[in-house]
Amino acid sequence: MTSKRASTGVRRRRSAASYRKLAVSVPSELVGAVEHEVRAGNAPSVSAFISDAVEEKLERDRLQEALDEVWRERPMTRRERAWADRLLGG
């Protein structure tokens, strides 16, 4: 059984039966960076690192969709946008 870290920092357990093999092409420099992270102990395996990255991307997309909906319902004022721009360095 493999552990999986959720965005809350809590490790979630998944059974081996819940996994499927997937072949993907990744730029060489990213492969090297991922392998380095595994060797450094920052991920238990390349598969776990990639799974975490995909899960984080999906969560960011869900959060962006929620924010987009909020901004459609109530757009930012000029003052709020200026504050956000200053905060984010934009």
Image (spheres, rainbow, N blue to C red):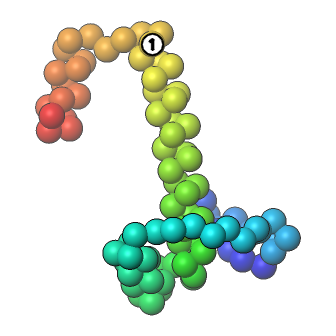
Q: What is the total number of numbered labels drawn onto the structure image?
A: 1
User: Does residue 14 show up?
Assistant: no
Using a 10 Å C-alpha cutoff, classify the residue at mark 1 as few (fewer than 14 neighbours), some (14 to 19) or many (20 or more). Answer: few
Place of residue 14 in the rendered image (x, y in percent of width and height, measured from the top left): 77, 68
Q: Position of residue 26 (x, y in %)?
A: 46, 68
Q: For the view shown, which residue lies furthest in the bottom direction?
A: 39
- Which amino acid lies under the numbered mark 1 shown in the image of this protein? Arg
Give the residue displayed 15% in from the left and 34% down from the top: 90
Mark 1 secondary-structure assignment = helix
> Which residue is under mark 1?
72
Relative image position of residue 63 (x, y in whole percent) = 51, 36
Identify which residue is drawn at 81% across, 65% down.
Answer: 18
Residue 60, compared with residue 31, is above or below; it is above
**For residue 50, what is the image quadrant?**
bottom right
Instruction: Give residue 39's quadrant in the image.
Output: bottom left
Give the residue displayed 42% in from the left and 10% down from the top: 74
> In the image, 28: left or right of 12?
left
Q: Quadrant of the N terminus?
A: bottom right
Relative height, residue 80 to residue 10 (above, below):
above
In this view, the residue in front, 41 or 30, is 30
Give me the residue at 16% from left, 21% from top.
82
Decide: is 67 above or below 2. Answer: above
Residue 74 in view (yes/no): yes
Q: Residue furthest right?
A: 17
x%, y% of residue 23? Answer: 63, 70
**On the rendered structure, is 3 left or right of 34?**
right
